[in-house]
């Protein structure tokens, strides 16, 4: 995986400067719900920020189902597919670490001024990117975390999640779920390259917490499909890992983040 930051693109069309948004999606055998997720991204509306345009960067981790065929059926120039074959195997958090590496590959290929993460099985409401970018622009960048609905496999609403501010040093789940966050390109110098064996959304949002650059959007912007089998983020997964192992990984992440924030600020 390349860790070099790609060229950031800003276009001028009809005398109007365009701002590119990169949506980074990680896929693996996601054929069942993928089309709904992609459609909801491509149909985003930009009413508050009319200068925005979108690219969808999909990193596929060697899917063996029809995932790639579904993506290729769009014939949409806004979609770019980058392959990623995960070769690392970890005793603990195996699927979560593999997912993080896949997202890291997508982020490494993003070209936008603002970057959003996407699972392969949710549905974004049409205003998600627009409202999130407004929050980032109002606050001079950083990381935005948006509220979301919880849904079952058929997207019947089962609840609503609105975030509260969190502490940096906390052993239980910390951070904000990847499919709900976005950040500006200036965060990349702290995020890239992803360390090995990390949880991607926790890593990104803990950096934002450490830098006091987390902004909360309490307007519901997506519905998260929780089925327990197709999600590529770690939300809702029971964690059977021994407490000492979790403490080890959390302390390791704290040290990496504190060093990066100090050395790269």
Image (cartoon, rainbow, N blue to C red):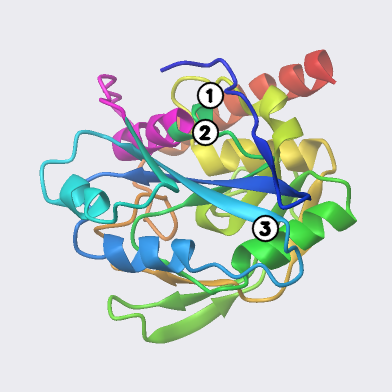
Helix, strand or loop at mark 2? helix
Front of the two marks 3 and 2: 2
Q: In 3D space, how far apart are the residues under numbered discs 3 and 1 (Cα atoms)? A: 20 Å
Q: Residue at x 52, y 16 (%)?
A: 3
Q: In 3D space, how far apart are the residues under numbered discs 3 and 2 (Cα atoms)? A: 17 Å
Q: In 3D space, how far apart are the residues under numbered discs 2 and 1 (Cα atoms)? A: 10 Å
Q: Is residue 44 above or below residue 105?
A: below
Asked if the residue under mark 2 is in contact with the one under mark 3, i.e. CB atoms within 8 Å, the reply is no
Helix, strand or loop at mark 1? loop
Q: Which residue is mark 3?
A: 145
Q: Residue at x 34, y 62 (%)?
A: 121
Image location (x, y in percent) of residue 223? 47, 74
Image location (x, y in percent) of residue 45? 60, 70
- Crowding at dot 3, Cα within 10 Å, few <14 / some 14-19 / many 20+, comes out as many
- Crowding at dot 2, Cα within 10 Å, few <14 / some 14-19 / many 20+, comes out as many
Helix, strand or loop at mark 3? strand
For residue 59, what is the image quadrant? top left
Q: Residue at x 56, y 52 (%)?
A: 54
Q: Is residue 181 above or below residue 89?
A: below
Front of the two marks 2 and 1: 2
Upstream in sequence: badge 3 or badge 2 = 2
Image location (x, y in percent) of residue 7? 61, 24
Q: Which residue is mark 2?
A: 107
Upstream in sequence: badge 2 or badge 1 = 2
Q: Which residue is mark 1?
A: 194
For the magenta stretch, what is the residue range?
83-105
């Amino acid at each position: 995986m390349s860790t070099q930051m790609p060229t950031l693109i800003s276009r001028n069309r009809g005398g109007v400067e365009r701002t590119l948004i990169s949506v980074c999606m990680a896929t693996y055998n996601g054929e069942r719900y993928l089309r709904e997720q992609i459609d909801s991204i491509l149909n985003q509306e930009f009413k508050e920020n009319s200068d925005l345009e979108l690219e969808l960067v999909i990193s596929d981790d060697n899917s063996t189902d029809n995932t790639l065929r579904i993506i290729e059926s769009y014939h949409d120039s806004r979609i770019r597919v980058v392959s990623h074959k995960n070769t690392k195997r970890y005793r603990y958090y195996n699927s979560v670490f593999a997912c993080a590496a896949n997202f890291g590959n997508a982020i490494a290929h993003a070209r936008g001024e603002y970057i959003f993460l996407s699972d392969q099985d949710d549905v974004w409401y049409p205003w998600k990117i627009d409202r999130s970018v407004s929050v980032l622009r109002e606050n001079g960048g950083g990381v935005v975390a948006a509220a979301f609905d919880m849904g079952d496999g058929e997207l019947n609403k089962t609840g609503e999640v609105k975030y509260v501010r969190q502490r940096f040093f906390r052993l239980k789940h910390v951070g904000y779920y990847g499919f709900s966050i976005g950040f500006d390109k200036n965060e990349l110098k702290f995020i890239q390259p992803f360390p090995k064996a990390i949880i991607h959304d926790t890593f990104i949002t803990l950096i934002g917490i450490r830098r006091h650059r987390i902004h909360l959007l309490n307007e519901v912007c997506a519905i998260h499909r929780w089925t327990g089998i197709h999600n590529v983020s770690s939300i809702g997964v029971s964690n059977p890992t021994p407490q000492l192992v979790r403490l080890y990984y959390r302390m390791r992440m704290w040290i990496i983040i504190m060093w990066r924030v100090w050395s790269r600020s």
